[in-house]
Amino acid sequence: MVATNNTHVSLPAAGFVGAVAALCLWAGGCLAAAPVFAHPAAGSGARSLRRAVEGAHRPGSARAHTRAASAEKKQAPKKPAPKKPAPKKPAPLAGDALRALAAYEAMQKYFYLKSSDLYAEALGEPQGSYLWPFSQALAATVSLAHVRTQQSKESFIVGGQLLGLQDYLAAAPAVATASSEELASIPHFAATVASVGGGATSFYDDNDWVGIELVRVYEMTHDQSALALAEQIMAFEQAGWVNDPEAPCHGGLPQDATEGGGYAITAAPAAELGAQLYRITANTADLQFAQTAYSWVRQCLLLPSGLVADHIEANGEEVDEVWSYTQGAMIGAGALLYQATGNSGYLDDAYAEAEATTAYFSLETLVSEGEAAPAFASILLRNLLYLGYVLRSNLGHQLAQEYLNFAWETLHQSDGLYLSVEGSDTSLLGQAGTVQIYSLLSTSPATYF
């Protein structure tokens, strides 16, 4: 019987031995020094122990014991056992991992606001950034935490970032929601810190990015509060789904609750978040929403080229701009849904879109996406690499390395910061995106979602 907190729990013999063995392994080999006990159910082991005990009392055993003791006295004293060598320190970081760390340390030095656990949007700004760049700094931290030797340090920083994230909270405790008009009652995150409590705009895609990283934080730290926040974001996304039967291409998620239409960049990462949560919670509502959001994008925004258009207006007009991160989110959603359901159709769709995307988005096209190019590229590359992981291929590796070679040779500065592609000062969004790409190539894709 084992007593714990005044509650007695009966363990079977095998369970007890296993528990003791585990404890001794943790304590550093106490089994070698501990007395041996036999459980009555131990069978032949118990009989062997009994024979050994009985043998000590057989005639002649005392004389043998005396002779053995006398021989031991004549032996020279034993030398102390040599000390075990100290465990080797892990090899220092090198290559992309070292550059990821250097870029991250520069981001923390020049953009992190220690007094508030927030980040400045641009160099020298005293106030916290918009939520979108903050979400990418959080993603950079989580990604770097998976690089060897960095987890304990970056997990600590993640804790501070979660405190900072609370400043973006737009509503307090959850209540039942029946329509999108009641969205403000669901805990979610507003676009800016200053607007909290003031009815400010809250973007669905901003919340998607935060939710995806909160799930990764949970998987890394098992922090239940991170998982609870991610689930609240999922509820926010679900409540925002357009159910108006007269809406063009019925369904979709707008950019925010104040406008109509539907955007690929809100629905696709929401599908990724739903699939992530389903993997952990097995909540079928999350999986069904992920499938609905994914199918809506393909039905309403898939172009003949195989790429995904940006959005559809409330009047039904399709805006066929294409952005790299939108393609990436759909590629990743397909891979995650395949893993969640086993339906190979999702994997086929993801691969077809990956082929169309890599044919269109060359290095020159990626860097032409403006100040946000590193963040956009990091989202595309994360998802391409993840699909490659699912397919057991090197999909995305060459493009990722080409991007980093360009960044190092053209944009890298001696202080660890990276200029924008236009040559202007570094922004938080650009630096965080660069950290992510370096980290992606230094860690297993299994940690990406």
Image: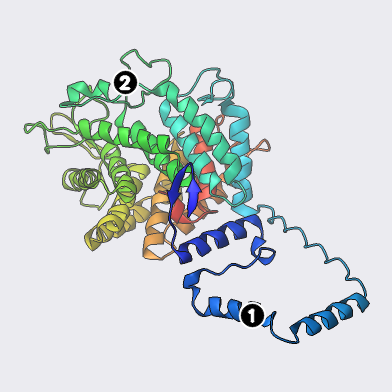
Instruction: Choose between 125 and 184: the one closer to the eye.
Output: 184
Residue most extreme to the top: 198
Rendering coords of residue 447 (x, y %): 46, 51
Q: Which residue is the site of mark 2?
A: 201
Residue 208, numbered circle: none
Find numbered disc 2 in the image and state the secondary structure of the residue it sits on.
Answer: loop
Above or below — where is 17 with respect to 315?
Answer: below
- Asked if residue 332 shows in the view, the reply is yes
Residue most extreme to the bottom: 60
* x 23%, y 31%: residue: 254
- Which color scheme did the rendering employ for the protein? rainbow
Figure quadrant of residue 286: top left
Which amino acid, mark 1?
Glu
Q: Residues within 10 Å of mark 2 (few under 14, many from 20)?
A: some
Rendering coords of residue 285 (x, y %): 21, 43
How far apart, in angstroms, are the residues tagged by discs 1 and 2?
83 Å
Residue 54, numbered circle: 1
Rendering coords of residue 370 (x, y %): 44, 35
Figure quadrant of residue 152: top right
